[in-house]
Image: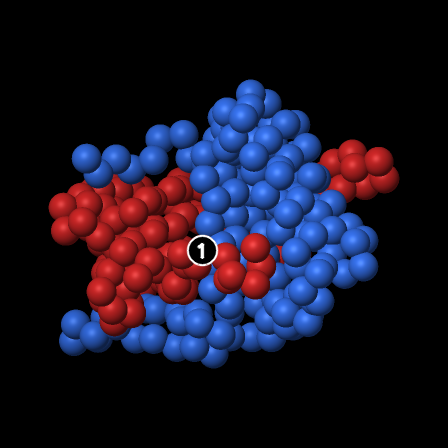
């Protein structure tokens, strides 16, 4: 069963993260790398992706005369996807356990961030294109 | 340049299963054809659909790192319904693809004009984070 683990945050939350010290970021990334290594070794790792910051985001709607309509203004409360991990696990509880590990990655001063991770199963029949 | 194109919906808007069969088939046929076209142009990196919001859990680590799951979300929360990652030469091309996806047919075959959030993905974490 493939699950996606979504890390989201508001613009203000992203600014807080950017104010972390280099040392705190280093510890966070080292723990994350080690977790990914474990997931690769257990065969559960499918993929991950980090996204650029909310200031790079545009919302696009359908075309008028063939031109996309873009807008870069979002409500302050909007949650942005910051990154995700996809894992292939035997049971949902294992996906939740991995999400909890991500949630305990160290933040400022080495304290766990306790960031919430949204967990959802991927559609089992994705639209095939080839 | 890699971009992610995200389709977000509210829980209430996640009504695709309630569409008439004919409209749903036309919608899916459109998506398959768009994916096929992007695959053939070499621009499609990946595409996934997510299970519905009623399957979503929010996970945090509790004491001792045990996962604490919650399935309650505010009505206003946006859920990721699915995404495409495309590799394109310019942001404008990513917006044009997003506009195509936005205009996917809905009930009665009318374009949905749903908003698609577009953001560059990080090719690698910034060097200072490693």
Determine whether A3 is above or below A53 in the image: above
Which chain is drawn using red?
Answer: B
- Give x and y (percent) for residue A84: 52, 48
Residue ID at (19%, 45%) = B39
The residue at 58%/59% (across/down) is: B129
Q: Residue at x 76, y 42 (%)?
A: B61
Is A7 positioned to the left or the right of A16 in the image?
A: left
**From this viewpoint, is residue B102 visible?**
no
Q: Position of residue A105 (x, y in %)?
A: 71, 47
Q: Residue furthest right?
A: B63
The N terminus of chain B sits in image quarter: bottom left
Q: Nearer the viewer, residue A20 or A86?
A: A20
Quarter of the picture containing the C terminus of chain B is bottom right
Which residue is under mark 1?
A: B124
**Which picture quadrant has residue A57?**
bottom left
> What letter labels the chain drawn in blue?
A
Please give the name of the residue rendered at 14% of the width and 51% of the height, measured from the top-left corner: B41
Residue A61 appears anywhere in the view: yes
């Amino acid at each position: 069963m493939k699950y996606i683990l979504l890390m989201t945050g508001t613009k203000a939350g992203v600014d807080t993260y950017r104010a972390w010290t280099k040392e705190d970021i280093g510890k966070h990334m080292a723990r994350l790398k080690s977790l990914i290594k474990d997931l690769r070794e257990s065969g559960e790792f499918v993929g991950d992706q980090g996204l650029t910051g909310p200031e790079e985001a545009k919302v696009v709607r359908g075309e008028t005369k063939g031109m996309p309509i873009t807008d870069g203004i979002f409500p302050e409360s909007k949650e942005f996807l910051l990154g995700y991990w996809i894992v292939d696990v035997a049971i949902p509880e294992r996906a939740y356990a991995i999400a909890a590990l991500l949630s305990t990655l160290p933040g400022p001063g080495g304290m766990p961030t306790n960031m919430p991770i949204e967990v959802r199963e991927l559609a089992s029949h994705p639209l095939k294109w080839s | 340049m890699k971009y992610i194109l995200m389709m977000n919906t509210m829980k209430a808007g996640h009504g695709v299963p309630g569409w008439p069969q004919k409209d749903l088939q036309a919608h899916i046929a459109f998506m398959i054809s768009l994916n096929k076209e992007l695959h053939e142009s070499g621009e499609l990196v990946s595409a996934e659909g997510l299970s519905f919001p009623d399957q979503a859990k929010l996970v945090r680590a509790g004491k001792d790192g045990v996962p604490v799951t919650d399935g309650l979300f505010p009505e206003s929360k946006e859920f990721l319904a699915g995404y495409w990652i495309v590799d394109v030469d310019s942001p404008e091309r990513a917006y044009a693809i997003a506009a195509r996806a936005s205009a996917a047919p809905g009930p009665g075959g009318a374009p949905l004009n749903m908003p698609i959030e577009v953001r560059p993905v990080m090719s690698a974490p910034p060097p200072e984070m490693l």
